[in-house]
Amino acid sequence: MKKILFIFSIVTFFVSCKETTSKKAAEVKNQQVDSTANQVIAVAAFKGQQVTGVTVTDAGRIFVNFPRWRKGVDDSVVEITNNTVQKSYPDENWNSWEIGQPVVANKFVGVQSVVASENQLYVLDTRSQLFENVLDAPRIFVFDLATDKLVKTYILDKNSYHPDSYINDLRVDKKTQKIYLTDSGNSGIVILDIKSGRSRRVLDNHKSTAAEQGFLTFGDKKWENTIHSDGIALDTANDRLYFHALTGYSLYSIATNMLDSEDEKNIQESVRFEAKTAAPDGMLFDQNGNLYFADLENNKIQYRKPDGSIHTLVEGDKIKWADTFSIYNNYLYFTNSRINEVTADISNLTFTLNKIKLAE
């Protein structure tokens, strides 16, 4: 999910909402609704705390995160136990930083994403507050889930991010020993080498990572923001990385071996347009090769089968900006971050974590 709220830039648009809707309807086909449509199960609720990311470990441990988009964020990362107890992770000190304080190495500033891989938890810290420029280099904190102790900090190299970058989401590729990250503030993909810790930037301001427009439409209202490369998903069976701008309707992919190239032109030419889709936030593959993503504008969760057909898993008022996904025990976990509904005061809004059975 995301340099996402209250950036308030003035944009002139020449394409009407009606034309945009008609175009999407013509391009996105075969969207059947599954029988699981009414089986959304509530897992946890967060009043006045806007959740974005979720990850569930192989052992069933659940972690969520809350970006520092405003004052009053209680925790950046919490673990949910017994579906009710929310515990600061890894402890209260790591979550104790507040806006205006000096930035230190062992405290979270602006966590946008959490991803569990094998026995480690990767915590992506944008090092950004209130959608302002980064306070220092974005980084990934890696915790050993057996001990809940920090085992590694990856700090992005200066040439791999911009002052106004909002490093958004990540995928860990154990085959290539790389971590891939999207930048939604300044379009591009960051590739981080797990062994060396070095990072570099590709597809910088490329059409495949750039936003296609500066708004989304919800009913008769426009949510005006320009959000670049956001959703990212790794197809480990076919060794392809998929990515998508948030304010856009085009899904792209690239073979992971092409990302080893030092030739930027070669990388750009290797990008493949996959499909026209709804405007999504996060994305995730299941073990059957289905790619899950949200249709933010229409309160849906959809999935794209390996044959390219697009289907609707669930829709309705239980889906409120399905932000991030994780899979455990044949269930798709997702957060409702309600980003398009948020105003300055969120104290009376409730944000949720839910789950639903995967498509059969």
Image: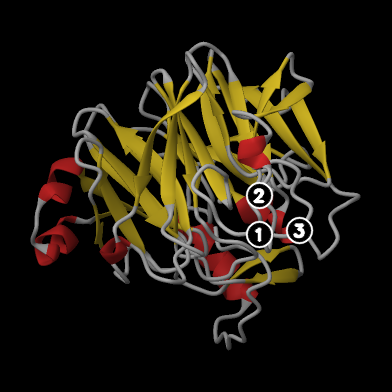
Q: Nearer the viewer, residue 116 or 203?
A: 116
**Dot 3, how many residues are within 10 Å of its Cα: few (below 14), some (14-19), or many (20+)?**
few
Q: Is residue 328 left or right of residue 223?
A: left
Q: Is residue 269 left or right of residue 33?
A: left
Q: Nearer the viewer, residue 106 or 134?
A: 106
Q: Which mark is residue 101?
A: 1
Type of amino acid under label 1: Gln
Residue at the image position 9 percent from the left and 57 percent from the top: 262
Q: Which residue is mark 2?
A: 97
Tag 2, which secondary structure?
Answer: loop
Q: Which residue is mark 3?
A: 71
Q: Which mark is residue 130?
A: none
**Dot 2, how many residues are within 10 Å of its Cα: few (below 14), some (14-19), or many (20+)?**
many
Q: Is residue 265 left or right of residue 339?
A: left
Q: Are marks 1 and 2 in contact (CB under 8 Å)?
A: yes
Percent across and percent down for residue 101 are: 66, 59
Which badge, 3 or 1, is on the more N-terminal residue? 3
